[in-house]
Amino acid sequence: MSEDLRRIIWIASFPKSGNTWARGVLGNYFQPPGQSLNINRLRDFATADVRQSFFDRANGRPFHGRTIEDWMRVRPEAMRLIAASKPGHHFVKTHCQVIRFRGQPLIPPEVTAGAIYLVRNPFDVALSYARHIGVDADAAIGHMADRTATQGSASGILEVVGRWDDHVRTWTTAPGLTLRLMRYEDMVADSALAFRNLFAFLGVPVDDAKLQHTLKATSFEAMQKQERETGFHERPSKMEQFFATGTAGGWRDKLTPAQVARIRVAFLPALEKWYPEMLDETARIAEGAA
């Protein structure tokens, strides 16, 4: 009888949507009393589906892929190795969509126990993503609207990101997937409530004092301070600072009416579903681009 590897709880998101924050809260909450988890040890708590060591093991030698086919040849076994790397349920970060790609599922059901999906409004994502990949906002919006968009490492380990709205749709409609969706804006507005609800989804009793301590230790200011003092291993080389603002609504001061209009046109059905409260305001701003 084969081993049941349905152990992974994915922490999934389009890039720059709160994934690091969620991992920080979870990682710190599950630490033994009196201990905390530095931002550069997040990978000790929750690995990622792009971890080089798992691809090396799955490949039988150091993995250096040159094509998408090279990556997909190794990814299924790498995901099984990740699932088997810890007993019981454990968390794994991903930016991939839930789709079949080159004939195989990127998020294999046979290793999946459930998922936490983080969504952030695309207006704020555009600004943060621009900083992340080292381009201007217009180029970032173009990336967010590209169905073929991928990102990857120098060794050829890829992430199939695709369009922002497709990303949200594939995760929130994946058949049979046990999912908890968290909006970044709700996490900012009431962090305690958002994470209390997450722990309820995970079946974890909440210690209010411990949760408050955890939220303080993983506040944006606290993580920003850690990055200043020790750096952050996950910061892309083109990005000056990973923890830059951490707010919701910064797009109002930085996106032009034309950029707001582009995002509305590209993602309107998804905005209507997930961000109906933004429709009127963004429509008024977009009118200024006419």
Image (spheres, rainbow, N blue to C red):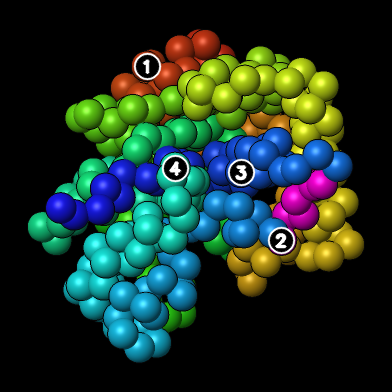
In the picture as drawn, the residue positioned furthest to the front comes out as 1
Q: Secondary structure at mark 3?
A: helix
Indicate the amino acid at tag 1. Lys
Return the x and y of residue 212 as percentages of the image width and height.
Answer: 81, 25
Q: Which mark is residue 40?
A: 2
Are the residues tagged 1 and 2 within 8 Å (C-beta)? no
Residue identifier under label 3? 23
Q: Nearer the viewer, residue 238 or 83?
A: 83
What secondary structure is the magenta-colored segment mainly? loop
Looking at the image, tell me whether mark 1 or mark 4 is earlier in sequence order: 4
Q: Separation of disc 1 and disc 4 at Cα?
A: 31 Å
Q: Per the image, is 90 magenta?
A: no
Residue identifier under label 4? 89
Q: Separation of disc 1 and disc 3 at Cα?
A: 26 Å
Are the residues tagged 2 and 4 within 8 Å (C-beta)? no
Closer to us: mark 1 or mark 2?
Answer: 2
In this picture, which residue range is highlighted in magenta?
Answer: 35-40
Q: Is residue 232 above or below residue 6?
A: below
Q: Is residue 175 above or below residue 243?
A: above
- Tell me what residue is drawn at x 83 percent, y 65 percent: 230
Q: Is residue 195 above or below residue 135?
A: above
Residue identifier under label 1? 273
Q: Separation of disc 3 and disc 4 at Cα?
A: 15 Å
Are the residues tagged 1 and 3 within 8 Å (C-beta)? no
* Residue 200 visible in the picture: yes
Closer to us: mark 1 or mark 3?
Answer: 3
Q: Nearer the viewer, residue 229 or 253?
A: 229
Please rate how many residues cluster around mark 1, counting C-alpha atoms within 10 Å: few if below 14, some from 14 to 19, many from 20: few
